[in-house]
Amino acid sequence: MRKIILAAAAAGAALTLSACSEGAEEPVDSSMADAEANADAGMEMIDSAADSGMEMVDSAADSAMEMVDSTAETVDSAAE
C-alpha cells in the first residue's frame, strides 16, 4: 500500500515538474498515462487482496460454525 502511495506521489511530482517546463506536453501525457497505469495496477492489487481476505474470513467462519455444531452435538449426546 505504501508503494502505491509513493508511486502516486512520484507520478504527481513528475507531472508538476513536466508541467513547469515549456513544450512539455508529450512528457506530461506520458507521465499521466504512467500514473493512470500505476493507479489501475494498485487498485487491482487492492481488489485482489480484499477478495483473498474475504475468502479467508468466510472459510474461518465456516470452520468455526462446524466446530460449534460438532461441540453442541457432543454436549447433547453426553447429556442424554
Image: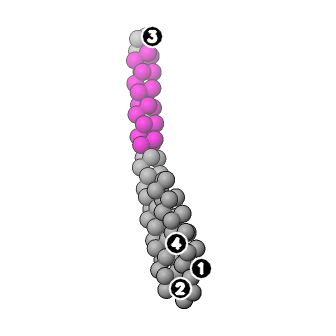
Residue under label 2: 24
Say above or below: 59 vs 31.
above
Kind of residue sitting beneath label 4? Ala
Instruction: Indicate the secondary structure of the residue bearing disc 2.
Output: loop
Residue under label 4: 14
Q: CA–CA distance between discs 3 and 1?
A: 80 Å
2 and 1 marks in contact (CB < 8 Å): yes
**Magenta stretch containing residue 6, yes or no?**
no
Kind of residue sitting beneath label 3? Ala
Q: Name which of mark 4 and mark 2 comes first in the sequence.
A: 4
* The quadrant where residue 44 appears: bottom left
Residue under label 1: 20
Q: Name which of mark 4 and mark 1 comes first in the sequence.
A: 4
Task: Point out residue 9 in the picture as x, y percentages from the top left corner.
Answer: 54, 63
Which numbered circle lies on residue 79? 3
Residue at the top extreme, as displayed:
79
Task: Point out residue 61 in the picture as x, y percentages from the top left corner.
Answer: 46, 36
Q: Pointer 2: residues within 10 angstroms few (<14), some, or many (20+)?
A: few
Question: What residue lies at 40% left-to-right and 24% top-to-bottom?
Answer: 70
Which stretch did the figure color magenta? 56-76
Q: CA–CA distance between discs 4 and 1?
A: 10 Å
Q: CA–CA distance between discs 3 and 2?
A: 81 Å
- Name the image colouring: one colour
Residue at the front extreme, as displayed:
21
**Magenta stretch containing residue 71, yes or no?**
yes
**Circle 3 or circle 4, nearest the eye:** 4
> Is residue 13 visible in this depiction of the protein?
yes
Horizontal placement of 70 versus 18: left or right? left
**Circle 3 or circle 2, nearest the eye:** 2
